[in-house]
Image (cartoon, grey):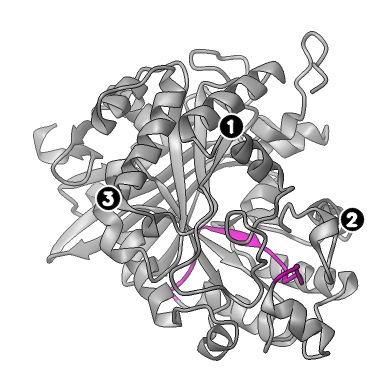
């Protein structure tokens, strides 16, 4: 890797949203339900290729989580990125289907890698990370909707704050056709359980599956946000591609399946982005699959850039989070009005009220957000902060020179959430917190409730 010049940050968009993302890949393991028709068979983690960057890095290190984290931290430091606030993403398969001991050892290895030393237990590793140089501020686990609900407590024990579900499309007939192995009801139940436990919820969506078409894809996409059983916080949109060793490759050569071309995909994505609500963030568009492994379908990894360009040039009003982030406005050298205001969007989701709090300016550029859920749990009103995030290029802990981070936006958002909780007559407010953010919340008057799933809690009766 070519080293950056003094003062230069290589690939600045990596940390432009305020955290440093570290992907950790699982070792190869077949899915219990078999293989979806679009999954390749390449003797690497399910749905990936031997030349996917994250697979190449992980395989060279024997898929050891400790070594992967250490290597990624070193790479980010060499590129002059801050590595104080780390977001961990566990990739490569249905993590919760791996043997139980492996899961605990793998997660402990992640914290040990961040801490720079090996602890005796996972709990000890987490405690060390609360004050570590490299703090885990968020931890994401990918899983299937049908392998989720029974493991909620374990996810919290791992320090998980976000779960990404392989939803693809909400249609049982297509699920059966592509051998997905779960139902729409599984998606509904997983979303309900995760939301009430405070997790941030991401869906993987796959336009262009066999049995669908652009019109159907758009109709079902609209349903994601009109039906209160869904309403994800985040999306990854991966148009279906034909890959080697998959059943879909056979169907393609037999003339039974044809993927969308670039024009069809771009037109569909523009329509999708028009309807994405302001509380949802599109994390990715297109997967990082080397073109040589794509038999048919889109080969452009950079389609998101083309899409953003098309949306901005057409002056289409896009509310999606990433499109409005202050970090990207800085990158594009747009003029940023410093005066901000607090905006609150309230919507229904699974019988509860979601409050989406934002710090924005008059141009709707986003500086920070908070997700608050208020719902009835055993006939008692519960308030849960599911996410607090201040955007802008990441600053080291203690620095104050940025345009958005460390300007008190987080405290302002939490205070407003507490006011809403009190107005709704909630006795307590809980926060699903990354391990490395616990000390921050302690300064705001919260304490760790280890019995109730390791949430940070404030009891209004004790204030």
Q: How far across and down, in percent of the image, does residue 172 sit?
A: 51, 87
> Is residue 426 a member of the stretch shown in magenta?
no
Badge 3 vs badge 1, beta-carbon distance below 8 Å? no
> Is residue 229 a member of the stretch shown in magenta?
yes
The front one of 89 and 33 is 33
On screen, residue 82 versus residue 347, left or right, reads right
Outermost residue toward the top? 6
Relative height, residue 346 to residue 262 (above, below): above
Disc 1 versus disc 2: distance between alpha carbons? 26 Å
Along the polypeptide, which appears first: circle 3 or circle 2? 3
Relative height, residue 10 to residue 26 (above, below): above
What label does residue 18 carry, if any?
1
Q: Residues within 10 Å of mark 3 (few under 14, many from 20)?
A: some
Disc 3 versus disc 2: distance between alpha carbons? 46 Å
Magenta-drawn segment: 228-245
Which residue is label 2 attached to? 313
């Amino acid at each position: 890797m070519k080293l950056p010049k003094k003062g230069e940050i290589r690939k600045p968009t990596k940390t432009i949203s305020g955290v440093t993302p570290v992907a950790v890949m699982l070792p190869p393991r077949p899915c219990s339900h078999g293989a979806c028709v679009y999954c390749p068979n390449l003797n690497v983690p399910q749905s990936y290729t031997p030349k996917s960057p994250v697979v190449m890095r992980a395989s060279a290190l024997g898929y050891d989580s400790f070594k992967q984290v250490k290597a990624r931290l070193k790479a980010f430091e060499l590129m002059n990125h801050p590595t104080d606030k780390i977001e961990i993403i566990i990739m490569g398969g249905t993590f919760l289907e791996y043997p139980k001991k492996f899961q605990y050892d793998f997660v402990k290895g992640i914290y040990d890698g961040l801490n720079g030393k090996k602890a005796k237990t996972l709990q000890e590793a987490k405690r060390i990370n609360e004050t570590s140089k490299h703090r885990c501020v968020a931890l994401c686990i990918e899983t299937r909707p049908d392998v989720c609900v029974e493991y909620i407590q374990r996810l919290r024990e791992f320090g998980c704050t976000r779960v990404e579900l392989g939803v693809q499309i909400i249609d049982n007939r297509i699920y059966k056709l592509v051998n997905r192995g779960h139902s729409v009801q599984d998606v509904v139940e997983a979303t309900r359980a995760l939301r009430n436990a405070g997790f941030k919820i991401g869906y993987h969506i796959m336009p262009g599956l066999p049995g669908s078409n652009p019109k159907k894809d758009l109709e079902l996409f609209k349903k994601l946000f009109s039906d209160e059983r869904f309403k994800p916080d985040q999306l990854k949109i991966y148009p279906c591609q034909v890959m080697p060793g998959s059943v879909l490759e056979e169907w393609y050569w037999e003339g039974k399946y044809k993927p969308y071309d670039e024009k069809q995909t771009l037109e569909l994505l523009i329509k999708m982005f028009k309807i994405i609500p302001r509380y949802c963030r599109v994390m990715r568009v297109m997967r990082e699959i080397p073109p040589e492994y794509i038999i048919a379908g889109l080969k452009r990894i950079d389609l998101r850039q083309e899409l953003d360009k098309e949306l901005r040039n057409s002056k289409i009003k896009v509310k999606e989070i990433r499109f409005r982030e202050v970090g990207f406005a800085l990158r594009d050298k747009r003029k940023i009005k410093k005066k901000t205001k607090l905006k609150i969007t309230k919507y229904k989701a699974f019988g509860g009220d979601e409050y989406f709090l934002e710090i924005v300016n008059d141009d709707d550029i986003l500086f920070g957000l908070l997700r608050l859920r208020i719902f009835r749990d055993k006939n008692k009103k519960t308030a849960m902060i599911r996410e607090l995030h201040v955007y802008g290029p990441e600053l080291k802990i203690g620095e104050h020179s940025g345009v958005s981070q460390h300007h008190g936006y987080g405290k302002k958002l939490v205070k407003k959430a507490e006011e809403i909780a009190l107005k709704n007559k909630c006795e307590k407010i809980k926060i699903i917190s990354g391990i490395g953010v616990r000390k921050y919340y302690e300064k705001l008057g919260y304490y760790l409730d280890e019995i109730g799933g390791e949430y940070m809690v404030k009891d209004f009766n004790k204030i």
